[in-house]
Amino acid sequence: MPKPEEARYTKTHEWIALEGSEATVGVSDHAQHEMGDVVFVELPKMSQKLEKDKPCTVVESVKSAFDIYAPVSGEVSALNSAVTGEPAIINQSPLEKGWLFKMKISNPDDFKTLMDWTAYQEFIKQNVH
């Protein structure tokens, strides 16, 4: 799995790492801290077509339920079933073990529009209340 500096980020705090034409998607470390203890994860379906910026799954914590948005458009190619059996993995290891799903990207240019690590850190600083 990627180092935080190698992933791209959305304004809704999903991370995505690209390996060839397949991308891995998860919740950022910042988001998992803000959510609190994750207690339930609903993953998308295998082969489900996802549309950029549309809700595709749900993560529920002790605080609330949160929609997870597709950072790019594409088709689900793998699911991390470990997070459904043990949702706390997202809190313990959001980038390495707590990824949610993999997807085949339909438009690689979508990836280029996402924030890099530096831009994401600045985004977090500007949006902390």
Image (cartoon, grey):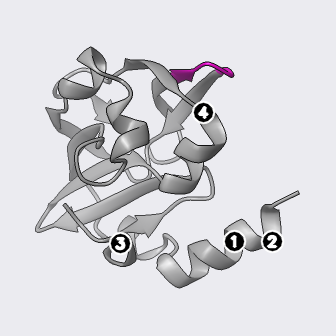
Q: Which residue is mark 3?
A: 109
Percent from the top left, x then y, of residue 80? 19, 32
Percent from the top left, x then y, of residue 51? 42, 41
Q: Secondary structure at mark 3?
A: helix
Labels 1 & 2 near each other (Cβ < 8 A): yes
Quick check: is 62 in the magenta stretch?
yes
Q: Which residue is mark 2?
A: 126
Which numbered mark, 3 or 4, is in the foreground of this view? 4
Residue at 63% from the left image edge and 58% from the top image edge: 11
Q: Which residues are magenta?
A: 59-64
The amino acid at mark 3 is: Asp
Q: Nearer the viewer, residue 86 or 79?
A: 86
Mark closest to the chain's N terminus, 3 or 4: 4
Q: Nearer the viewer, residue 63 or 25?
A: 63
Q: Residues within 10 Å of mark 2 (few under 14, many from 20)?
A: few
Give the quarter of the figure containing the N terminus.
bottom left
Q: CA distance from mark 4 to mark 1?
A: 20 Å
Which numbered mark, 3 or 2, is in the foreground of this view? 2
Q: CA distance from mark 1 to mark 2?
A: 5 Å
Numbered label attached to residue 36: 4
Q: Nearer the viewer, residue 83 or 72?
A: 83
Which numbered mark, 3 or 1, is in the foreground of this view? 1
Q: Quadrant of residue 41?
A: top left
Q: Residues within 10 Å of mark 1 (few under 14, many from 20)?
A: some
Quick check: is 78 in the magenta stretch?
no
Q: Which residue is mark 1?
A: 123
Mark closest to the chain's N terminus, 3 or 2: 3
Mark closest to the chain's N terminus, 3 or 1: 3
The amino acid at mark 4 is: Gly
